[in-house]
Image (cartoon, rainbow, N blue to C red):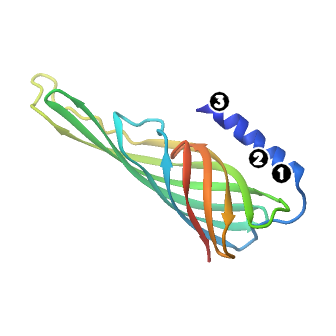
Amino acid sequence: MKYLLVPALMLVLLCSMAFSAGSMYNKGEKVGFLGIGLGGLGGFYGSADLPVILVGLDYGVHKDVSVGGVVGYTSSSNEYPGYKWKYTYIIIAARGSYHFPLDVENVDVYGGVDLGYNIVSSKFDGPAVTGFGTVSASSSYLLWGIHAGGRYYFTRNIAAFAELGYGFGIFNVGIAMKF
């Protein structure tokens, strides 16, 4: 995974140097997004039952910088003969992004960091294990991540986005809307 991030980040940086001037992102602008995260999250147990579902908001605090938040949900399960664990994950994170000033129409290229908390809960289905007390696999934890991506605006306010990163999914895709 980290072997994919370094080339992706280098590509974003090279693209930003190759172009100049304008920016698709502005101070005071709000962009909401809805998407799915593909690829595993660090800290998942078992096999994924569904991809990470993401919803978030970015707010422009500078012509090239945004801050915001993102919430994600997913689940996974782990089975052995006669035993099954079902895990749910609710991820709440703050994020900050730098929007590269490109002179490319309808394109917003950005990269940034995420910091939040992954709330993990589990449900066990199977016979009681004598002598071991309560069997629990719940474990919430601090989550950090990085992201590099871009948005392509089909209209003035509607865009598709794609991100590579670590924290939610390795590859996140979805729609975004300025308002």
The residue identified by callout 3 is: 3
Judging depth in this view, the residue of 30 and 40 nearest the camera is 40
Q: Amino acid at mark 2?
A: Val
What is the distance, in whole Å, between disc 2 and disc 1 at their CAs? 6 Å
The residue identified by callout 2 is: 12
For the residue labelled by badge 1, is the local secondary structure a helix, a strand or a loop? helix
Q: Which quarter shows the N terminus?
A: top right
Judging depth in this view, the residue of 156 and 83 nearest the camera is 156
What is the distance, in whole Å, between disc 3 and disc 1 at their CAs? 21 Å
Task: Using a 10 Å C-alpha cutoff, classify the residue at mark 1 as few (fewer than 14 neighbours), some (14 to 19) or many (20 or more).
Answer: some
Comes first in the chain, label 3 or label 2: 3
Question: Vertically, is 130 above or below 6?
Answer: above
Q: Amino acid at mark 3?
A: Tyr
Q: Residue at x 80, y 45 (%)?
A: 13
Residue 134 visible in the snapshot: no
Q: Is residue 151 left or right of residue 77?
A: right
The quadrant in which residue 132 appears is top left
Q: What is the x, y in percent for residue 22?
A: 85, 66
Q: Amino acid at mark 1?
A: Ser
Q: Are marks 2 and 1 in contact (CB under 8 Å)?
A: yes
What is the distance, in whole Å, between disc 3 and disc 2 at their CAs? 15 Å
For the residue labelled by badge 2, is the local secondary structure a helix, a strand or a loop? helix
Q: Which quarter shows the C terminus?
A: bottom right
Q: What is the x, y in percent for residue 63?
A: 79, 67
Residue 16 is tagged as: 1
The quadrant in which residue 104 appears is bottom right
